[in-house]
Amino acid sequence: MSPKVGVAPKRRAEIIEATFFCIALKGYSNITMQDIADSAGVSKGVIHYYFRNKEELFLSVFEKLVRDLDGHIARKVERAKTPPEKVCAIIGAVFEKIRENKKFQVVLVDFWAQSTKNPRLMAANASQYARYRHLAKKIIAEGIRDGYFKECDPARVASALIGLIEGFTIQWIFDEKAFDLVRAQKMTEEIIIGFLKE
Amino acid sequence: MSPKVGVAPKRRAEIIEATFFCIALKGYSNITMQDIADSAGVSKGVIHYYFRNKEELFLSVFEKLVRDLDGHIARKVERAKTPPEKVCAIIGAVFEKIRENKKFQVVLVDFWAQSTKNPRLMAANASQYARYRHLAKKIIAEGIRDGYFKECDPARVASALIGLIEGFTIQWIFDEKAFDLVRAQKMTEEIIIGFLKE
Amino acid sequence: MSPKVGVAPKRRAEIIEATFFCIALKGYSNITMQDIADSAGVSKGVIHYYFRNKEELFLSVFEKLVRDLDGHIARKVERAKTPPEKVCAIIGAVFEKIRENKKFQVVLVDFWAQSTKNPRLMAANASQYARYRHLAKKIIAEGIRDGYFKECDPARVASALIGLIEGFTIQWIFDEKAFDLVRAQKMTEEIIIGFLKE
Amino acid sequence: MSPKVGVAPKRRAEIIEATFFCIALKGYSNITMQDIADSAGVSKGVIHYYFRNKEELFLSVFEKLVRDLDGHIARKVERAKTPPEKVCAIIGAVFEKIRENKKFQVVLVDFWAQSTKNPRLMAANASQYARYRHLAKKIIAEGIRDGYFKECDPARVASALIGLIEGFTIQWIFDEKAFDLVRAQKMTEEIIIGFLKE
DNA sequence: CATGAATGAGATTTCATTCAT
DNA sequence: GATGAATGAAATCTCATTCAT
């Protein structure tokens, strides 16, 4: 029957959210704990009460990011029926996420850069992409088996699929006006589905 | 450019080289001027003699990086004769560069991340990709005109080409064993040339 | 004494006990209230309920320490009959205490060091040793009067007695294997009684 | 021909000296780097320029302390001729040091207390006393061999000698007025030499 | 040209203490 | 009585930059 119980998880989430916005705004290594505290509307001490240190906090932000994207992709893929639809679901899920919140990709790139110094982050990045490739590979293999796609190496096409998505979004965050993101998404589908169907 | 150019270009180049290695090793925002001084075998003071400040130095490193890659691509493209060969020259140039020196891409990603905070870097990144897209677009347009490629939007295919290259290399730096880079290069050619030839 | 005494003496005693163990383990100024709370199995808040602040708590630990040792010595001395036996009782009491619990001396040294900053502690330390010297002096004077000991300055021999005990135990806590504590005790008796009997 | 060369060792020594005074004044764990900086008349940064961190600095202070005392004892012992004179030289050296600078012992006790937490300090303390015991043991053994002292265990008497010295000085720093330090020194000689000669 | 000692602002982190529940 | 979330002051440490020599 202790007081304030139940506040903790909410407060944790708030701090993670605030940190996400700060990273998007100023970049991973330019934020101070004070920035985060101000943004979350709490005192500096509170952040260390919930997170052992800066690295722990940032890792939590990254985990939430990945969990969100994973969930979004999974839900979209689940709803799709045929393998081609599922491939498009993956593509659509990522492009949508970026389109609806450009910060998403900005923060992701920041995490990429930090992984040089942080082995845990490096491993997390590696496993994230491995997971996406694995998902894509499974769908493509299924498509080949069921006659939707031509005979090819599913693993390699999976890498290309993930690569094409990331490659487009990267270019886009540096220059939003370079091309239209919706068209980039269609182009991705066209190229990958085109390649798979012959 | 930067001040005091011409005083001792060799020393300048050495410092830039040392900085490049340091970034690759520890990441942009984890290096100290002391790290760089140690790596270059000079005193801390001397770095400030050649570069106004840390940002100036890092920008010089970035400029050199881009200049190197630009030159490498240009030389390879020049040697190619037909548009398809030229497209493959671009692909080959980048993949080769990464393969021969993984640090290259690592440092590049680091610069990407820093551009959130640094408008000059953001602009430099944007213009780099714009330049590559422009080069690719020109070649593709030429290919369409000369009947090598099917009718399509050269700009969009150019974006896809650059995106696919970057997407592959990004995945690779997180996990070298995820796939073979030479095969990724072939896959890129296959997908893009396949798409262009229908 | 301290406020709120009598509210729950058992809880108070538990906290003092836990604090004693923490000091022995990590040292006076390296412990946090959290350490103590964890060790006592209570919440941080409760400590401040029983003790105004950290200093008050630490002083209580010191007081208990001294009270324990005083009682132990008094009981042993009381049981002894002749002055030489009483001198040996003092020696035996302290050595026994240290032997049975090395932490005892470790914590004591820690309190010594803190007295530089804390006048109350300084006074407490001074009075503790004054008390022991006084006790020893009284016994020695009695021994001289009753013909057990040769004519000498009881106060000075008392200082030497206390000094020899402390000097041995100090060396021993730094290196248990330097010498055997039982033999050190015998040596103390031999030297002091030998000196007193000429 | 670089400037300011030669300043470094002097500055290092100054900081060590200032730290020593601060410890004597406020105690090991109550000093801040700012206190030391102020006392040394330099900026906070300078201290970290010369010493990696607080622990490193404090260890340097301790080393200097020990080095000073060691040298002082060695010089006095060297000048003495017979074993009894050498024993008195050890006793005199330590008592003199404390008498001429009470801070010496205060700081030493502080280091003792810190050794609970710091294994390096613990080892240093242990080795310091082991060294003193070894020196005393050698002298006593020599004295026995040459007929100056009665047959006895030199190691145990050495421990007693060191113990008696430390025990006296400890009591004295808590209460200067408890007894006269010169008389304590004489008492130490009387007791130890008395014991050794019969 | 070159050095490296010095600075000082600012970052992370710790922790005794308070207080609403 | 008891909890643990919250505070904020203060401590350690880092580091780009300056500058006398």
Image: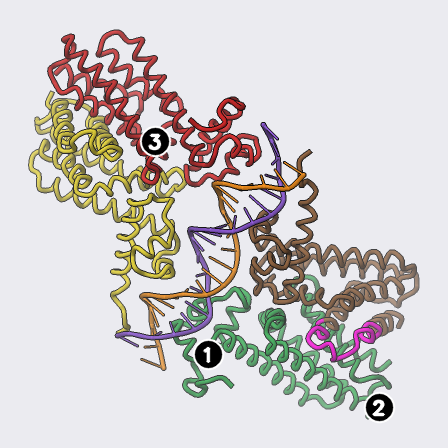
Chain colours: A yellow, B red, C green, D brown, E purple, F orange
Q: Secondary structure at mark 2?
A: loop
Label 2: chain? C
Residue at 88% in and 73% down: D198
Residue at 61% in and 53% down: D42
- Distance, label 3 to label 1, CA atoms, is 57 Å
Magenta range: D170-187
What's the amino acid at mark 3?
Ile
Residue ranking furthest to the bottom: C146
Does the magenta portion include D171? Answer: yes
Q: Earlier in the sequence, mark 1 or mark 2?
A: 1
Q: Is residue A67 above or below residue B15?
A: below
Tell me residue A190's x, y (percent): 12, 26
Residue C131 visible in the current orientation? yes
The crowding category of the residue bearing disc 2, from other C-alpha atoms within 10 Å (few below 14, some 14 to 19, many at least 20), is few
Q: Are marks 1 and 2 in contact (CB under 8 Å)?
A: no
For disc 3, the marked residue is B173
Does the magenta portion include B101? Answer: no
C70 with respect to B84 (left or right) = right
Q: Secondary structure at mark 3?
A: helix
C52 with respect to B46 (left or right) = left
